Protein backbone atom coordinates (compact mmCIF):
# COMPACT_ATOMS: atom_id res chain seq x y z
CA UNK A 1 0.00 0.00 0.00
CA UNK A 2 2.89 2.37 0.75
CA UNK A 3 4.22 2.00 -2.81
CA UNK A 4 0.77 2.80 -4.19
CA UNK A 5 0.66 5.90 -1.99
CA UNK A 6 4.19 6.84 -3.10
CA UNK A 7 3.20 6.43 -6.77
CA UNK A 8 0.23 8.78 -6.23
CA UNK A 9 2.53 11.30 -4.55
CA UNK A 10 5.15 11.14 -7.31
CA UNK A 11 2.47 11.60 -9.96
CA UNK A 12 1.11 14.70 -8.19
CA UNK A 13 4.55 16.18 -7.56
CA UNK A 14 5.59 15.68 -11.17
CA UNK A 15 2.61 17.67 -12.42
CA UNK A 16 4.45 20.73 -11.08
CA UNK A 17 8.14 19.74 -11.19
CA UNK A 18 10.45 16.83 -11.91
CA UNK A 19 12.62 16.49 -8.82
CA UNK A 20 15.83 14.55 -8.72
CA UNK A 21 16.67 11.84 -6.26
CA UNK A 22 17.93 14.24 -3.58
CA UNK A 23 14.98 16.63 -3.89
CA UNK A 24 12.45 13.76 -3.81
CA UNK A 25 13.94 12.54 -0.51
CA UNK A 26 13.48 16.01 0.98
CA UNK A 27 9.96 16.53 -0.41
CA UNK A 28 8.80 13.21 1.05
CA UNK A 29 10.55 14.16 4.31
CA UNK A 30 8.52 17.38 4.49
CA UNK A 31 5.31 15.53 3.60
CA UNK A 32 5.88 13.10 6.43
CA UNK A 33 6.89 15.80 8.91
CA UNK A 34 3.62 17.58 8.15
CA UNK A 35 1.62 14.44 8.98
CA UNK A 36 1.49 12.44 5.75
CA UNK A 37 1.55 8.80 6.85
CA UNK A 38 4.38 6.94 5.11
CA UNK A 39 6.20 5.43 8.07
CA UNK A 40 9.67 6.22 6.74
CA UNK A 41 12.53 6.58 9.22
CA UNK A 42 15.10 9.21 8.28
CA UNK A 43 18.70 9.52 9.35
CA UNK A 44 21.17 12.24 8.50
CA UNK A 45 23.23 11.83 5.34
CA UNK A 46 25.70 13.91 3.36
CA UNK A 47 22.85 15.81 1.65
CA UNK A 48 20.58 16.03 4.69
CA UNK A 49 17.82 13.71 5.90
CA UNK A 50 17.79 10.45 3.94
CA UNK A 51 15.73 7.28 4.07
CA UNK A 52 17.09 4.11 2.46
CA UNK A 53 13.62 2.51 2.56
CA UNK A 54 12.24 5.38 0.45
CA UNK A 55 15.06 4.88 -2.05
CA UNK A 56 14.24 1.15 -2.15
CA UNK A 57 10.52 1.87 -2.66
CA UNK A 58 11.32 4.17 -5.59
CA UNK A 59 13.53 1.44 -7.07
CA UNK A 60 10.68 -1.08 -6.76
CA UNK A 61 8.34 1.35 -8.55
CA UNK A 62 10.98 1.76 -11.24
CA UNK A 63 11.42 -2.01 -11.63
CA UNK A 64 7.62 -2.35 -11.86
CA UNK A 65 7.62 0.22 -14.68
CA UNK A 66 5.60 2.76 -12.67
CA UNK A 67 8.27 5.45 -12.50
CA UNK A 68 11.41 6.09 -14.49
CA UNK A 69 14.65 7.88 -13.83
CA UNK A 70 16.13 10.18 -16.44
CA UNK A 71 19.59 11.70 -16.44
CA UNK A 72 19.46 15.49 -16.68
CA UNK A 73 22.89 17.03 -16.35
CA UNK A 74 24.24 15.76 -13.06
CA UNK A 75 20.76 15.00 -11.70
CA UNK A 76 18.78 11.80 -11.89
CA UNK A 77 15.16 12.93 -12.28
CA UNK A 78 12.29 10.80 -11.01
CA UNK A 79 9.27 10.86 -13.32
CA UNK A 80 6.05 8.90 -13.67
CA UNK A 81 6.08 6.41 -16.53
CA UNK A 82 3.28 6.11 -19.05
CA UNK A 83 2.00 3.16 -16.94
CA UNK A 84 1.53 5.00 -13.66
CA UNK A 85 -2.21 5.51 -14.22
CA UNK A 86 -2.68 1.78 -14.79
CA UNK A 87 -0.91 1.12 -11.50
CA UNK A 88 -2.98 3.54 -9.41
CA UNK A 89 -6.29 3.58 -11.34
CA UNK A 90 -8.17 0.98 -9.31
CA UNK A 91 -7.16 2.57 -6.01
CA UNK A 92 -6.97 6.24 -6.99
CA UNK A 93 -9.67 7.32 -4.54
CA UNK A 94 -8.25 5.24 -1.69
CA UNK A 95 -4.52 5.76 -2.07
CA UNK A 96 -4.39 9.01 -0.09
CA UNK A 97 -6.96 10.34 2.36
CA UNK A 98 -8.32 13.90 2.54
CA UNK A 99 -5.85 15.00 5.22
CA UNK A 100 -2.97 13.68 3.12
CA UNK A 101 -4.33 15.41 0.00
CA UNK A 102 -4.29 18.71 1.89
CA UNK A 103 -0.73 18.10 3.09
CA UNK A 104 0.38 17.08 -0.40
CA UNK A 105 -1.09 20.23 -1.93
CA UNK A 106 0.62 22.41 0.69
CA UNK A 107 4.04 20.82 0.19
CA UNK A 108 3.70 20.92 -3.60
CA UNK A 109 2.69 24.59 -3.51
CA UNK A 110 5.48 25.61 -1.13
CA UNK A 111 8.43 23.24 -1.51
CA UNK A 112 8.46 21.42 -4.85
CA UNK A 113 9.90 24.34 -6.81
CA UNK A 114 12.73 24.96 -4.34
CA UNK A 115 16.20 23.99 -5.50
CA UNK A 116 17.80 20.80 -4.19
CA UNK A 117 20.26 23.00 -2.27
CA UNK A 118 17.42 24.95 -0.60
CA UNK A 119 15.65 21.70 0.28
CA UNK A 120 18.91 20.29 1.65
CA UNK A 121 19.36 23.29 3.95
CA UNK A 122 15.73 23.43 5.10
CA UNK A 123 15.50 19.71 5.79
CA UNK A 124 18.88 19.59 7.55
CA UNK A 125 17.92 22.52 9.79
CA UNK A 126 14.60 20.85 10.58
CA UNK A 127 16.30 17.54 11.34
CA UNK A 128 18.86 19.21 13.65
CA UNK A 129 16.12 21.09 15.52
CA UNK A 130 14.13 17.87 16.04
CA UNK A 131 17.22 16.05 17.30
CA UNK A 132 18.10 18.87 19.70
CA UNK A 133 14.54 18.94 21.01
CA UNK A 134 14.54 15.17 21.42
CA UNK A 135 17.86 15.13 23.29
CA UNK A 136 17.70 18.42 25.21
CA UNK A 137 14.02 19.45 25.11
CA UNK A 138 15.03 22.70 23.40
CA UNK A 139 16.83 24.02 20.35
CA UNK A 140 18.64 27.32 20.73
CA UNK A 141 19.47 29.06 17.45
CA UNK A 142 23.18 28.96 18.27
CA UNK A 143 22.95 25.19 18.83
CA UNK A 144 21.08 24.74 15.55
CA UNK A 145 23.76 26.69 13.68
CA UNK A 146 26.48 24.61 15.34
CA UNK A 147 24.61 21.38 14.58
CA UNK A 148 24.12 22.24 10.91
CA UNK A 149 27.76 23.34 10.60
CA UNK A 150 28.92 20.06 12.16
CA UNK A 151 27.06 18.18 9.41
CA UNK A 152 27.60 20.55 6.48
CA UNK A 153 30.85 22.31 7.32
CA UNK A 154 30.89 25.76 5.76
CA UNK A 155 28.44 24.88 2.97
CA UNK A 156 25.85 27.25 4.44
CA UNK A 157 26.43 30.56 6.20
CA UNK A 158 25.01 31.41 9.61
CA UNK A 159 22.61 33.87 7.89
CA UNK A 160 21.39 31.16 5.52
CA UNK A 161 20.79 28.81 8.45
CA UNK A 162 18.91 31.51 10.38
CA UNK A 163 16.82 32.33 7.29
CA UNK A 164 16.01 28.63 6.93
CA UNK A 165 14.79 28.62 10.54
CA UNK A 166 12.52 31.60 9.76
CA UNK A 167 11.19 29.86 6.65
CA UNK A 168 10.42 26.70 8.62
CA UNK A 169 8.66 28.74 11.32
CA UNK A 170 6.61 30.57 8.68
CA UNK A 171 5.51 27.20 7.24
CA UNK A 172 4.78 25.91 10.75
CA UNK A 173 7.37 23.13 10.62
CA UNK A 174 8.99 24.74 13.65
CA UNK A 175 7.43 26.62 16.54
CA UNK A 176 9.27 29.70 17.74
CA UNK A 177 9.55 29.90 21.52
Image (cartoon, grey):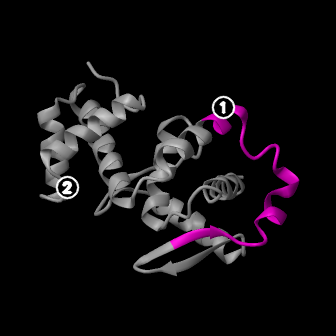
Q: Mark 2 points at which residue?
A: 151
Relative to the observer, which residue lies in front, 48 or 106?
A: 106
Q: Which of 177 and 161 is in front in this view?
A: 161
Do the residues bearing badges 2 and 1 touch, measured as CB atoms within 8 Å? no
x and y, in percent, of residue 5 in the image: 68, 51
* Residue 45 horizontal/vertical position (percent): 31, 60
Query: Which residue in the protein does label 1 denote?
Result: 99
Query: Along the horizontal axis of the image, is 12 left or right of 53?
Result: right
Q: In the figure, residue 177 lies in which quadrant?
A: top left
Task: Verify whether residue 83 appears in magenta.
Answer: yes
Question: The magenta stretch spans which residues?
Answer: 77-102
- For the point 76% across and 65% down, the residue is 84
Horizontally, residue 66 falls left or right of residue 78, namely right
Quick one: SS at disc 2? helix
Answer whether residue 26 is magenta in the image: no
* Residue plotted at (70% across, 54% down): 8
Above or below, comparing residue 7 to residue 137 in the picture: below
Q: How many numbered marks appear?
A: 2
* Left or right of residue 83, residue 112 in this image: left
Q: Distance between the residues labelled 2 and 1?
A: 33 Å
Up/down of 31 relative to 135, above or below? below
Callout 1 secondary element: helix
- Between discs 2 and 1, the one toward the N terminus: 1
- How would you rate the neighbour count of disc 1 (Cα within 10 Å): few for under 14, some for 14-19, many for 20 or more? few
Residue 108 is left or right of residue 133, and the answer is right
Amino acid sequence: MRNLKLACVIKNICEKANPGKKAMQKIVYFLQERGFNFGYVYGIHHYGPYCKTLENDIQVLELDGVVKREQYGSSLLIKPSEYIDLYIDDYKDKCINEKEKTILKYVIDNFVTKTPLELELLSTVHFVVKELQRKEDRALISDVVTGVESIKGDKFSEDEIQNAIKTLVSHEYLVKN
